[in-house]
Image (tube, grey):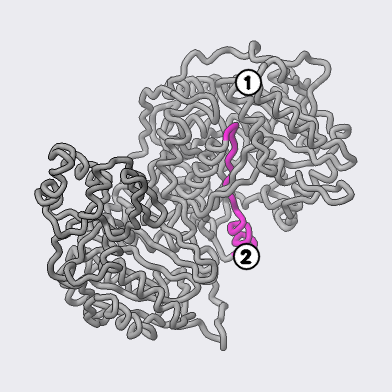
Amino acid sequence: MHTQPRLKANYQVEVVDGRRVFLLAEGKHFVLDNPVVAALVPLLDGSHTVMDLVARLAPVVGPAQSFAALRTLEAGGHLAEGSLAGAAGALDEAELAWWDIHELTPSDEPATVQLAAVGAADAVAADVRDGLLRAGVRVQSATVDELSAQPGGALPVVLVDDYLDPALDGLNRAFLTAEQPWLIARPLGRELWLGPLLTPGSTGCWACLEQRITGNRQVERYLAGRADRTGAGGRHRDAERRAGAVAAHPVTARHPAAVQVFTGLLGAELVRRQSGAGGGTLDGRLVTIDLKTLAVDEHQLIAQPQCRRCGDPALVSQRSPKVVLSPAQASHTTDGGFRVQPPQQTFDRLSKHISPVLGAVTVLSAHDVGGNGVTYSFTAGHNFAMVNDNMDLLRRNLRGQSGGKGRTEIQAKVSAICEAVERYCAVWRSDEPVVRSSFAALGAGEAVHPADLLLFSDRQQANAAAWNADPANRLHLVPEPFDQNRPIDWSRAWSLTNSTERLVPAGIAWYGHPDLAEHFYCVGDSNGSAAGNTIEEAVLQGFCELAERDAVAIWWYNRLRRRGFDLASLDDPYVRTLQQFYAGMGRDIWVLDITTDLGIPTFVAGSHRDHAVQDVMVGFGAHPDARTALFRALTELNQFLPFVDQRDDDGNTIYRTDDLETLDWCRTARVEDQPWLLPDPGQPPATLADFAELGTSDLADTVQWCVNRAAEVDVEVMVLNQTRPEIELSVVKVLAPGLRHFWRRLGPGRLYDVPVAMGWRAEPLDESALNPYSVFF
């Protein structure tokens, strides 16, 4: 208990009816209905000891009641120490209130910093110094070279015009060696940047910061790769100083009022820190203040255990490829598949990775149809590496979004975040374990030939130049023939089928691998990529995607008539609500069973508009549990509705896409002309009773069941671990040579063989007879 307690100075105090005490603070109000507290209030000015207070009330209140009232006030956080000396004793009431708000006592020693500036920030360094002095901060001016040469002493504060200035790397190394905390800040531009405060051994370092910022500067990275770029006046801004910064973007705009705002905020934080504020706002956090909108945002710096400066790069570069499946019971199976925890827990764990500045996920936003409470869909931003200086690729990357779906809002959010993290983890960063060799030197026993994964036909490769030149074929680019004698990088994967290491082409395994700039032997894609709370979750998700797309390709390109599924047999209120919602939009909804010889229940959910232009949409789902697969297909269908839900005054669709292939499909595909899209009227519809129960919800057992099913049709299942140590999510790429992507890849194999083996066709189609429409997403 305080020696001489006082009510905190930031309270407005009102007493009503001699017993109810109102304590009013900014954004907070407290009511204490206690006549003893009411009697104490006039005495709580900090001039009385506890025993004095008890004695003052003794004529009317017993000591036990007085002590109880004081304990109530103290427990509520309403009291502070009144016996102030030194700097605290010189404060007036308003200043004391400021300190009470922060629950601090001012230090007798002023905060001291070493202030240095880099680039355009030097122009405001003197103003920042003067402002800090007015805030009570002692300032020692220094240069970057001086700080690097003699780290230690007062806290270094480095003002910059760009957080990627190459000079910061040398500072970072010096401060890491000296275990010296330091703070970076930008007093320029529309957005003021404060922090992070970098503390070796506690937070990430500047190199951790640089990796995330660089990843989210896609335009700057594109420009850095252009040898023909020029700045205003025919030169790059400050080109010499920026030579080492890959994604440099210095900011120079300044205004005296902005500098005052910056200095006031920085000074307050430094004073608080000096007075013992634990867990300061800037500890490992960047705070941005948008001076146009007055929006304030926090961005958490994620320490990277594999950081080249403060971590151990071997965590990734020397990681074993072996994948060991451990028993893991799925406790959440009602939405989104088999999961070991509910989606809210996953969201809470991963939300710190969402940031346009420091995030693996740049943004998370709703993408549903008018907030209808039925169809939940979210998009999450992610960044990709550039394999060359292609402007069209840059444009697609900037608009690239990961999608999330679910029966609930939180499941859709988590689905979007996990897909964005999956994309992030699959970007090539040069620290991945690889073997450099040619296929001819390795041999088929050790390495997987790209053709066995891509499955393009000879005819496609012969016509690749003309095909690739058509913008409508952006998803279906055909690579050049693979040179078996050319050394490339091979990533180390693990065969779950044969319990052995296999080498897979790194250009297929990772986005943006540099081999493809020299030898365009493949097109990277997300097929089989998946994320999960555990590696078992991720592997199951990835394999289900492979099975789904294999089944879709076989059905789509052969235009097979398949049986429908009786949605009414589910007797599910969500399904009934969904059917009513679609009907209200003038749309039909149906489901097809397209399960193949793999035996993984796989469905297509379809919908078309009752209009001359039908805007046919489809969603797919596969899972060993048929009910889960079915709802995956339905929720993926929901995910596409926002692209076609808006209408003009004449009832025509306003499309939310400019993709040529998607627009062609929406405007021209009609179910009357494409009856394979609809249930086959000659077959009775399926129900859940037609699908065998899995019999387990253990994830390792379920994965093994899938591996066994694949082995029965002579398909090997391999897993490449792409998990990044700094993200609490397992990420893998599952590969299964022979299973088809649903993009237009028309080489020999299951695309032609399965329809015959299943009795759906008497003989395989010729390549020329396959569906002229390609899957458009």
- Outermost residue toward the front in this view: 59
- Region in magenta: 390-408
Q: Can residue 487 be found in the magenta stretch?
A: no
Q: Quadrant of residue 153?
A: bottom left
Name the residue tied to disc 1.
597
Position of 103 with respect to 342 (left or right) is left
Give the structural element (helix, strand or loop) at label 2. Answer: helix
Give the residue displayed 20% in from the left and 66% down from the top.
Answer: 106
In the image, what residue type sits under mark 2?
Met
Label placed on residue 493: none
592 vs 548, left or right, is right
26 versus 369 height, above or below: below
| Figure check: 13 above or below 370 | below
Seen from this angle, which residue lies furthest bottom?
233
Q: Mark 2 points at which residue?
A: 391
In front: label 1 or label 2: 2
Q: In which quarter of the image is residue 751?
A: top right
Q: Is residue 457 visible?
A: no
Residue in the picture at 52% in, 85% down: 235
Say above or below: 591 vs 42.
above
